[in-house]
Image: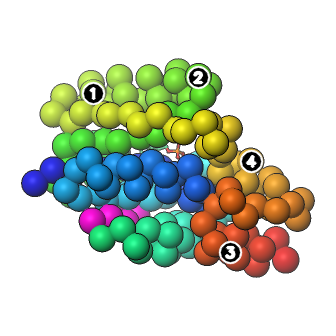
Amino acid sequence: MKRALIPGTFDPITAGHLDIITRASTLVDEVVVGVAQSAGKNPLFSVDERLALVKEATQHLKNVSAVSFDCLLVDFANEIGAKILIKGLRAITDFEYEFQMTALNYQLDKQIETVFIMSPPQFMYLSSSIVREIASLKGEVGGFVPECVKTALETKFA
Ligand code: PNS
């Protein structure tokens, strides 16, 4: 059985993340979305809030589950038995950061393969940070995020 891990901070999960998760779910038997604690990034949503939003946004995908983690990515992948990391790649700006992480993860564990799925054009520009900024300024985020995230953002910035 092929199990893949999609890691990220998901602060919060966007329509772009959901697109990658959905497409990944058709490529492997099981997808685990790993919600990183990422305390150093000072997230807007707590890890429990981010995890709950990922779970709600993906509940219609039967072979997708979500778990939070606070350790090295390769250690978490081994813990859950995932030998494939799947990540989304947006514009060229993502490339250097992802290139570095992929190289380092490969150095840490050569049994774990990183695979990229390109974001479709409509999500190339989309990021959690832009969504947070729009929401903080009371802009319309519908279309950029799942409905549950829109509600959570409205509550957060009420
Ligand atoms: O959505 P993000 O913030 O770009 O995701 C980054 C994430 C969570 C994938 C990355 O920070 C990560 O892998 N964190 C776990 C700790 C770790 O293994 N760091 C070394 C990576 S080479």
Amino acid type at circle 4 is Ile
- Which disc number belongs to residue 92? 2
Amino acid type at circle 1 is Tyr
Amino acid type at circle 3 is Ala
- Whichever of callouts 2 and 3 sits on the residue coming sooner in the sequence is 2
Give how far apart the Cα atoms at labels 1 and 4 are: 30 Å
Query: What residue sits 68% from the left and 56% below the top?
Result: 144
- Residue 64 sits inside the magenta stretch: yes
Give how far apart the Cα atoms at labels 2 and 3 are: 30 Å
Query: Hey, which quadrant is residue 73 in on the image?
Result: top left
Which corner quadrant holds the C terminus?
bottom right
For mark 3, what is the residue?
152
Q: Quadrant of ligand 1?
A: top left
Would you say residue 8 is visible in this rendering? yes
- Which disc number belongs to residue 130? 4
Give how far apart the Cα atoms at labels 4 and 3 are: 16 Å
Determine the secondary structure under disc 2.
helix
